[in-house]
Amino acid sequence: MSEGARNTRRFFGASSSGAAGSGGAGSASNRDGSGIGAAASRSSDVNTGILDENVLALVFRSINFDPKALCTVARVSRRLRAVAERVLWRELCISRAPRMVSSLTGAPAAGVAGNPPPGRIVGGWPALAKLLLFCCGAASASVPGHFTGVSRFSKTSGRSFLTRRCRGDLLYVSDPCEHAVPGADDDVGAYRGVFRGFMRSRTRACLVGRRVALETRVRCPYCGARVWSMVAAGLVPRSAWKRLGAYEGRLEYYVCVSGHLHGNCWLARLTSSDGDHDGGGGGGDDSEDEDDEEEDASTEGGSDDGHAAN
């Protein structure tokens, strides 16, 4: 029996016993008002749970799931934090990147009539929301993390980060977020991404098969899990540098055990004869129609305090 049903039964049971007894404890409690207060306290529990979650979801949908407001509400109490982690961060991800969420969860596209919303996702919805909204920066170049404006995540770019034997994996990678570094001639680009079904991916199988050790000093900035260095594992294809428009060999690339990717690189200066680094550069597998392969996630950041989805 559910908690709501038990509370309802107790409420009606207490009311019946109080009405049946004449001059008993039940009648006395009703006369002094304490019975009414106890009954009201019990009945209030019946209206908790999904009704409140729906109201919160509607409120945040009306403000486009503002991440700063959501972070503030999640800090109010444990119950609101639980609702945020279970419902609100998921709804934020669906509203900002519906096709990307559909691909990652294997669920029908959000917003299609009759289709259920996606359920669980590896690493959790708060981590995915933070990945959509937050650039982790580059610690090695003293570039701090920050909320982003609008980030584009692309499956086509993701294939450029996979070796030939791992091209069957599905990986979304963002365009690099460019940062000027004081005293340096070149800019640093920070990027991030996420695998679908990382536990069953060929990339993870390669890392485990090669017995690549997990990093001791680096953690995933999105879920806090331990990470592998793809550079140390020798699993960074040349197409990754070309896709980013970065200097070859000047790149960091990490993947955590939950399948979140983050890294940074030194961006090469463009000249009039260089062309556009983002136009191809990934080999034959990157020549597909990008209108079908790219996912534009309108991830408008709402704060600069660095606490997204924590």
Image (cartoon, helix red, strand yellow):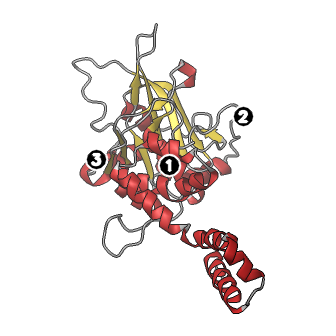
Hey, what amino acid is under mark 2? Thr
Q: State left or right for residue 274 relative to residue 117.
A: left
Question: Quick one: label 1, few (<14), some, or many (20+) residues within 10 Å?
Answer: many
Residue 7 seen in this snapshot: yes
- Give how far across and how far down residue 251 sits, in percent: 50, 28
- Quadrant where the C terminus is found in the figure: top right
- Circle 3/circle 2 CB separation < 8 Å: no
**Mark seen at residue 287:** 3
- Tell which of 217 and 288 is nearer to you: 217
Provide the residue designation for mark 2: 216
Q: Earlier in the sequence, mark 1 or mark 3?
A: 1
Which residue is drawn at the image coordinates 52% and 37% (left, top)? Answer: 262
Hey, what amino acid is under mark 3? Ser
Per the image, label 1 sits on a secondary structure element best described as helix
Q: State left or right for residue 244 relative to residue 52.
A: left
State the image quarter where residue 111 is shown: bottom left
Distance from disc 2 to disc 1, alpha carbons, whole Å, reads: 23 Å
Per the image, label 2 sits on a secondary structure element best described as loop
Provide the residue designation for mark 1: 128
- Give how far across and how far down residue 255 sits, in percent: 57, 42
